Image: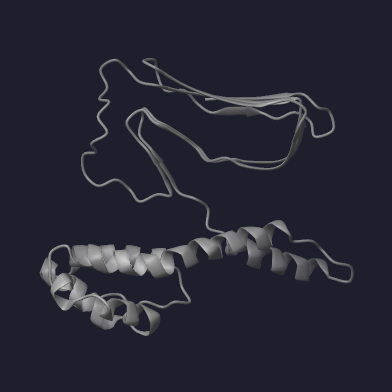
Amino acid sequence: MAAGNYKVPPPFDEKKSYESWKNEVEIWRLVTDLEKKKQALAVALSLTGRAGDSALEIAAVDLNDDEGMNVLLTKLDAVFLKEETDRQYEAYTEFDRITRENGVSMVDYIVEFERRYNRIRSPTVYADSNSVVLAKEMTNVKAKNLNCNIETGSDPGSSQSVNAVGQLPQADYTARGNSVIWADKISGVTLDGDLNISVNTSRAGAGTAAATLPSSQEPGDEAMET
C-alpha cells in the first residue's frame, strides 16, 4: 500500500497469505478517508482473478452499504480461508517428515530445514486474566495414563462478563470470561491406560501451566496441571 494513497486498498495476491491480506485491509480501513459504505466497493474493484470473480457475484447494492465489507469478506472467506488452512496443514506435514537422506550435505539439509520451518505459522493465542489457553505439542511419549487437569481462577472482585471493552487482538485461539481452550497437538503417544481430561473453575488466582513428561523409554503417568 503506497504511503499517502489511502484511498487505494491493499492489492490481493493469491500466492500470499489471505489472512495477512485481510489484516492489511483492516489497517487500511482505519486510515482511509473513504466513507464506510464505499470501502467494500473500492476493495471489490481492486480484486482480480478468482477473488475478482467472487466479488462480482455480489450485488452492487449489497457492497454499497455500511456492512458491505462484511458481505465481501464472507464471500472471499468461503473461497480462500479453507485454502489458507490447507496450506498451513501441508506446511506442518512437510516439516514433520523432514529427514536427512544419504548423500545430502549438512549445509543442504539445514537450508531445507529452514525453508520448511519458515513455512510454518505458529498459532496466535489471546487469553484474559481469568482464562486459559493450552496450545503445546506432545510427541513420542509412552505412559500408563495421560491426565490433563485444567483450572481457571479469578479474584472475587474481577469481572466475569464476556463483553470485551475495546477491540480484542486477532488470534487463532481466543479465551475470555473464565473460559478454557485445550488445543494441544498430540502425536506418537502410546498409552497403556486412559486419557483423562478435567476442567475446573475456582475463585482463586489464575494458575500457571506446567507439564511433566515421562521418559519415552520408561512408561509412567503423565500429569499436566494448569
Identify which residue is drawn at 84% across, 33% down. Answer: 217
Q: Residue visible at 44% across and 77% down?
A: 14
Considering the image in quadrants, where does the N terminus appear? bottom left
Identify whether 102 is placed above or below 203. below
Residue 115 place in picture, x, y as percent: 64, 67
- The front one of 195 and 220 is 195
Residue 25 to residue 9: above or below: above
Say whether residue 157 is left or right of residue 95: left
The residue located at (10%, 69%) in the rendering is 35
Is residue 107 visible in the rendered structure shown here? Answer: yes
The answer, for residue 2, to whether it is visible in the render is: no
Side of 49 relative to 28 (left or right):
right
Q: Nearer the viewer, residue 136 or 68?
A: 68
The quadrant holding residue 224 is top right
> Percent position (x, y) of residue 154?
35, 20
Residue 143 x %, y %: 76, 28
What colouring style does the render use? one colour
Q: Where does the image place residue 104, in percent across and percent down from the top left? A: 84, 70
Q: Is residue 89 left or right of residue 82?
A: right
